[in-house]
Image: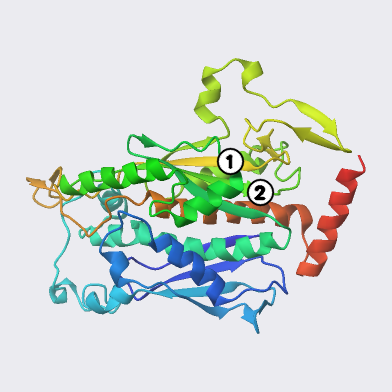
Amino acid sequence: MLRYLTAGESHGPMLTMVLEGIPANLPITAQEITGDLVRRQQGYGRGGRMRIENDEADIVGGVRHGLTMGGPIAVLIANRDWDNWKLTMDPAPTGQESDPKGPVTRPRPGHADLAGALKYGQQDIRNVLERASARETAARVAVGAVCKQLLRQFAVEIFSHVVGIGPIAAKTDDLSLAEIRERAELSPVRCADQQAGDAMMRAIDEARSRGTSLGGVFEVIVLNLPIGLGSYVQWDGKLDGRLAQAVMSIQAIKGVEIGLGFEGARRFGFETHDEIFYEESRFTRRTNRAGGLEGGMSNGEPIVIRGAMKPIATQYTPMASVDIHTKEPFRASVERSDICAVPAAGVVGEAVVAFEIARAFREKFGGDSLEEMTRNYHGYMRSVRER
């Protein structure tokens, strides 16, 4: 009922997203989408590309006078760097001889370069790296911005913060979720712990001076979800599995945790699960070790999901590789890159989580219009409260 596609290359003319399944009459503007695109571009440790691009959303389908019409929504995001790459990335059949940059033949360790070139039979690795690039996540952030707007109609809010970069870990146990959200948005590394954030920036500076990169961990939190999104009935209906796949699909993500995650495997059972109480005419929990998900379904507590991002594969002190044509050893080629993109990855994490939560909403509550979906939602919530 809700699906999307993205298209476009890192240095092509633009990125495109098409989102299908948003109900009619949802208020949405290009400015709301652009707001999240701007957040994605920020963060200490970003590279020179962010000084070139100034991402703005251009809605070209599915919205009229600020309201969705029920059809697919199409959004374009222009690549300003296209002006510098027209000859290299020209869609017309001009031939490689006109490319001033020449073919890329030295795959970078940790990237899609080698596997992609072999899989698709490419002699120029640029045909792989342009689409594999994390630049594609700008289109996914646009998708997520629309989905967030849908979820806000039901008081559902999604935010992220950085909990670790390199060896530096944030301490936020004494902060409320509101404080974490507010402080993260004010931090250059989107970390709610200022002392840890300062140490993270120093670690990024050290990585830059050594010609290398740093990874880290971000956390996405979803507030005010109703009980019962997702399903235990079939494997592909489980919301925790869908969320994990969505976060894992972000470029450079190598691990996902929900709730206690791997820490739960090191504890006894009574230290791992959340006891159930009935207070003030509703079921409640006093802990949220499950991260808001039990049996593949939302349980009414905040969803808490973390993504572990490896250090960006491009190294300014290049690593050993082999030329795919000559098979001679070389140092890998260097494409312009970030030193650390964990703060931006958190914003992308919000987007992919928002899509999966919105998809679960559409499955549960249906509706061709926002008004119909809202009626269904309130009817369900009444039945839950009356149990």
**Camera sees residue 246:** yes
Query: What secondary structure is marked by label 1?
Result: strand
Q: Could you tell me the amino acid type at mark 2?
A: Leu
> Which residue was labeled with disc 1?
304
**Camera sees residue 253:** no
Quarter of the C terminus within the rendering: top right
Q: Quadrant of residue 8?
A: bottom left
Decide: few, some or many residues near mark 2? Use Cα within 10 Å; few <14, some 14-19, many ≥20.
some
Q: Residue at x 53, y 70 (%)?
A: 33
Say if 377 sits above or below 226 in the image.
Answer: below
Q: Residue at x 51, y 74 (%)?
A: 75
Image x and y of residue 205, in percent? 23, 48
Image x and y of residue 232, in percent? 71, 36
As drawn, which residue projects farthest toward the bottom?
Answer: 65
Q: Could you tell me the amino acid type at mark 1?
A: Val
Q: CA distance from mark 1 to mark 2?
A: 9 Å
Say if 376 sits above or below 95 in the image.
Answer: above
Residue nearest the viewer, comparing 63 with 119: 63
For the residues bearing labels 1 and 2, Cβ distance under 8 angstroms: no
Q: Residue at x 46, y 42 (%)?
A: 307
As drawn, which residue projects farthest toward the right?
Answer: 386
Tally of numbered discs: 2
Image x and y of residue 171, in percent? 47, 36
Say if 78 sits above or below 148 in the image.
Answer: below
> Which residue was labeled with disc 2?
223
Is tag 1's residue or tag 2's residue first in the polypeptide sequence? Answer: 2
Q: Is residue 358 left or right of residue 282?
A: left
Image x and y of residue 196, in percent? 38, 40
Residue nearest the viewer, comparing 370 with 154: 154
Query: What secondary structure is marked by label 2?
Result: strand
Residue nearest the viewer, comparing 355 with 268: 268
Q: Quadrant of residue 81?
A: bottom left
